[in-house]
Image: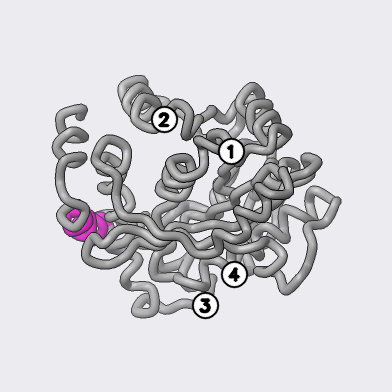
Amino acid sequence: MNTLFEVLSRLPLWAVHGMGWLCGWITLAASPKYRYQFLNNARLAGYGFWQVVAAVGQSGKMLLELPRLWRGRPVRVRWTGVELIEQAHRDGAGILFLTPHLGCFEITAQNFGRVYAAEHGPITVLYRPSRKQWLRDLVDNARQRPGELEAVPTTLAGVKQLIKALRKGEAVGLLPDQVPPEGMGVWQPFFGKPAYTMTLSARLAQVPGTRVLLAWGERLSWGRGFCVHVHAFEQMLGGERLDDDIAVAAGQINRAMEALIRQRPQQYMWGYERYKKPRRL
């Protein structure tokens, strides 16, 4: 597996994306369960297959581009909405970036660290360690970028590190549309269907001095790189502020994620098992 990662990391982005597109279609054709989840999740959001057909290849690109992003040469990245980041830095605020499974969510944190860490400290992101030891070691070593990006596990110690980073005025990255373990979320609508939704994102938003921003990495065609789009949380909800009630806030975050996904549904991971029952700890 290390050899495969090394080979993929050396390929140009357009080649990796081409192979990923093919893998996406093979997966859809070969897996009835994945195909059902993809079609059903899109239908719940009001989309027919032909409206989101491009997402089939995009999901495959997301998987195969990871070795290239983790081990390869830097790729081209441009940003929109950087004035929101700069204003937060001027205000001395910690930044909570919320990103759904849309586009290339890996590039948002990685490139933020590369651009801003020298002056404003690293970005800390939460991740769930793989249960397989060989994959855990591979991912842990590839994702960590000392001084730029700190990846912490989904444990109490990891959450404490997120809070500490926000209090220091640093940035934190989180995927709030992940399904948390039982007891760490609430049931809230997501595209009209109840989904077990993490409360951690809402709790982190309550850390004093925290600025909540939404970010997602658009995957550009033909291997031209990525464009990271940044939005103010209130902007996506028509000026509505995040509620102090954790359960209500979790529902608001779901609606903000929906609004972000509707900007480019062709790059959302519709095959993600968003409505599954939470696992027991």
Disc 3: CA contacts within 10 A as few (<14), some (14-19) or many (>=20):
few
Residue of label 1: 120
Which of the two labelled residues, at mark 1 and mark 2, occupies the earlier sequence position?
A: 1
Residue of label 4: 259
Disc 1: CA contacts within 10 A as few (<14), some (14-19) or many (>=20):
some
Of helix, strand and loop, which one carries label 2? loop
Residue of label 3: 46
Q: CA distance from mark 3 to mark 1?
A: 41 Å
Q: In x, y percent, where is residue 24? A: 26, 57
Disc 4: CA contacts within 10 A as few (<14), some (14-19) or many (>=20):
some
Q: Quadrant for the C terminus, please.
A: top right
Q: What residue span does the magenta drawing correspond to?
A: 17-27
Q: CA distance from mark 2 to mark 3?
A: 39 Å
Front position among marks 4 and 3: 4
Residue of label 2: 145
Q: Is residue 7 visible?
A: yes
